[in-house]
Amino acid sequence: MDTKWKNIIKVKLKSFRSNSGIRTLISFVCGMIALLFFYQILNGKYIYNTKETMQLAAMANVFLVICCVLGLGAALKRSLKEKAQPASYSDWKRLFRQHQKNLLLVFGILLLLAIYYLYSLIEGLHRIDYWISVTNFSSGYAMIFSTVIGFFSCECTLLFFMRKRLDAVMALAEASNQRIIADAVEAEKKSIEAAIKSEQLKVDLISNVSHDLKTPLTSMVGYIDLMKKEPLSDVMGDYVEVLSQKAKKLKEMIESLFSLAKVSSGNIQLNPEPLKLNRLMEQLYADLEEIIQDSGLEFVTELTAADTELVTDSSYLYRICQNLVENALKYSAPGTRVFLKTMSIPAETGRRIRLEITNTAGYHMDFTKDQIVERFARGDKARTSEGNGLGLAIVSTYTSALGGCFDVRIDCDQFKAIVEFSQDPPKSALPSSSEPA
């Protein structure tokens, strides 16, 4: 039963709040009653004492507050229906300032009138005969207090009304922002999907073309080797030798391109095993010793005495180190030194193994790190040196695949390549006991 009455009361209140005509009528009636009380106060200013005047003023203010709350609320709703709803915070702020300005103007006029009335009471005391004692100015004070109370009632009503409008504006803005964010996210998602698809198409194209070229190229290399075994003139022998060298170089480039495309697509299987970077560098130096000696470059090797053991795929790491050394061999200025360093450095996630190779370039380096690690990008734009522009691209791709970091630093003609790997890899990277290391 109580719930039923509560629901009925809620329905009635909701109907009352939505019915502007009833609120306006009640406001008008309360305003007239308040005016009657004020008239009684003004008419009996020489009769009522302070207590009686304040009692009448209190009753008048009760009806005045009801009149201000209901009347101003209805007027604001009516004006909002006639004008456009504020669609943004700036519109809401401009509307609020306009209503605030009008309210302050009306309050200022009424307050001045109330003060003038009190002043007239005080001045009237000096114009009457001395035997008439009129020292009660409570009606004047009542007018001032009533004006202030009416102002605060209207101010509170205005603030409540504008707060509801602000909530509606914020809700509208939030909905608009959500739509914008959703559209932006969807557009970004489509853009990323298109970029991924485009990149995958490039990788597939390179992979397929490389694979298709390997078969005829292998046949060409085989036939060239057969031609070498045949009796040929010196000129034809030289021609065949040049063909053999160019074919081998082309084969190496296609294999590198195919390997790069395979790693870029993520279609690789890593075989992590424990190894020491220092030992791998010593092996690489021994494998390239003849080439290094013929280059005329001086290699300065500084291998750290700290433990350089890490768990990674040895074949990929060997290829990374090989490409960095070959890059220095191809692009260093003649007669300069190449510095090769290994070190173990502390990090927040444990110790890391770093390999640095620094060389002096034999050409003007006007490129950035991002540019030089692109496929087919070469620092020697004049292409006076050997190389196909895949070396550092392979280093960058392979290093990322092994969970390492690759960086390039350029200082004038000094080129420094840095690769780093964690010495404490996650357990998932370690081989299981059933697998051979």
Image: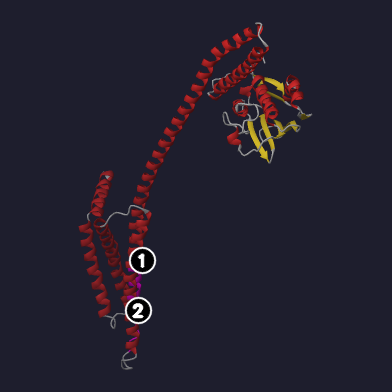
Q: In this orientation, which residue lies closer to the viewer: 262 or 402?
A: 262
Q: Position of residue 374 (x, y in %)?
A: 57, 31
Q: Main secondary structure of the magenta part?
A: helix
For the N terminus, the quadrant is top left
User: How many numbered marks are there?
Assistant: 2
Res. 43 in view = yes
The quarter holding residue 295 reads top right
Q: In this orientation, which residue lies closer to the viewer: 302 or 97?
A: 302
Q: Position of residue 188 (x, y in %)?
A: 44, 36
State the residue position of label 2: 115
Q: Mark 1, residues whose alpha carbon is within 10 Å: few (<14), some, or many (≥20)? A: some
Res. 270 in view = no
The amino acid sitting under disc 1 is: Phe
Label 1, secondary structure: give it.
helix
The amino acid sitting under disc 2 is: Ile
Task: Tell me what residue is drawn at x 51 percent, y 19 percent.
Answer: 209
Task: Tell me what residue is drawn at x 24 percent, y 76 percent.
Answer: 39
Judge left or right: residue 11 versus residue 395: left
As drawn, which residue projects farthest toward the right?
305
Judge left or right: residue 216 versus residue 18: right
Tell me, yes or no, whether the highlighted magenta stretch contains residue 136. yes
- For the record, the magenta segment spans 133-152
Tell me, yes or no, whether the highlighted magenta stretch contains residue 127. no
The quarter holding residue 51 reads bottom left
State the residue position of label 1: 152
Q: Position of residue 206 (x, y in %)?
A: 51, 22
Label 2, secondary structure: give it.
helix
Q: How far apart in space, not on screen, are marks 2 and 1 (Cα)? A: 18 Å
Q: In this orientation, which residue lies closer to the viewer: 100 or 356?
A: 356
Q: Earlier in the sequence, mark 2 or mark 1?
A: 2
